[in-house]
Image: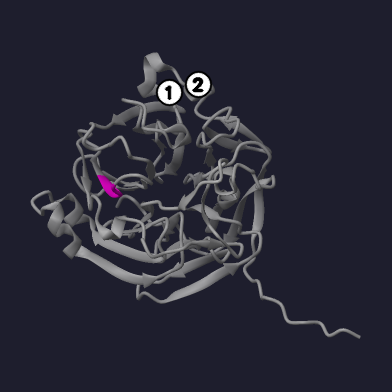
Amino acid sequence: MKPILPIEKYFGTLELVFAFNGAMPTGVSVSETGRIFICFPKWGDDVKFTVAEIVGDKLQPYPNLETNIVNLENITNSFISVQSVVADGRGTLWVVDTAAPNFSEPIKGGAKLVAVDLKTNTIRRVYTFTEDVVLPTTYLNDVRFDFRIGNAGYAYITDSSSKGPGAIIVVDLENGNAFRRLNGANSTSPDPYMIPKVEGKVLMNRNKDGGTSPFRLASDGIAISPDGKVLFFCPLTSRHLFSISTEALRDRNIPDRDLHYHVKYWGEKGASDGMITDAKGAVYAGDYENNSIRKILPNATMVTIAHDPRILWPDTFSIGPDQYLYVIVNQLHRQARFHYGKDLRQKPYSLLRMKIDEFPAPTFP
């Protein structure tokens, strides 16, 4: 009789919330009333609408289909390719439109941050960016908010460029003034020594013609402390966690060349895509190399709260009013661009959740 050999232990109770049999999702956000929003960037799949709401067992274009159809004559009020959606806990869904389908140069005037009123399901305001903020290499990724500062609050957006400098873009929501911070800094740049490995294999760009190149993406994951005073961030191709005072980020009297002195290093947390913070200050981050979800406590202690073979690239996180942690799992690493043009993804992609018994970090008093 052959012995039964030990196998890897998996843990963490995950529930399937929604299965996606169409385009690949990247973003999820759960509003204060429990509504669930999803986004689908245009990376090559047949994306019929780039922002959706889960209603029952179906996806509905949000706020409507018309807004999800690119209108070059009204580009500021139509969604081009949305990377992230974030409900702010006070009645607004914020939409980050890269305007960069297939990671192209952003369409001029199309990259934007859009505020959608969740009561009326209409666009309330659109923030566009000047050419010194959204560069030809920029890929707007994720956003966090603090409405306790200034007259209308501030937004912080990561630039996860693969070809240019990473950065954190600071936006004054009163007047729309925006500026880049930590532009090209080590903390917002890919780790040049990291060789990402997923499902036991090196992750790198592998083109149809046989050419290869390292996979490198800059600042991506972002989270904000419950009091709004600390911003956590990490490059996508890095295993390191950084933070900085939001006051220092907003203070333009601190030259960008000196801003790195205000960055705090938290150590390794695994390679992460999205991150989120709970009301007690813990940061939740994926580990896409190890099919895991980490929890980093305010004292820097790190625990793994889920390790499951179904966590095939944990992308974006959201914490709902039901005290569940929601996560998009989308097999990003199986895309054709990493496998000589062969798409290895297996549908469905999934939205999973696990009970954490914590509320999301507030964005307002």
Q: Which residue is mark 1?
A: 78
Any part of residue 319 in sight: no
Q: Amino acid at mark 1?
A: Ser
Q: Where is residue 238 drawn, in percent x and y?
A: 40, 62
Mark 2 vs mark 1, CA separation in Å: 6 Å
**Prevailing SS of the magenta stretch:** strand
Mark 2 residue element: loop
Q: Which residues are magenta?
A: 165-169
The residue under label 2 is which amino acid type? Ile
What numbered label is drawn on residue 69? Answer: 2
Q: Residue furthest top?
A: 73
**Which residue shows up at 49% across the image and 28% down it?**
63
Residue 56: give x, y in percent of width and height. Answer: 66, 38
Q: Which mark is residue 267?
A: none
Q: State the image coordinates of residue 28 (x, y, percent, origin top left).
A: 51, 45
Toward which corner of the image does residue 135 lie, by quadrant?
top left
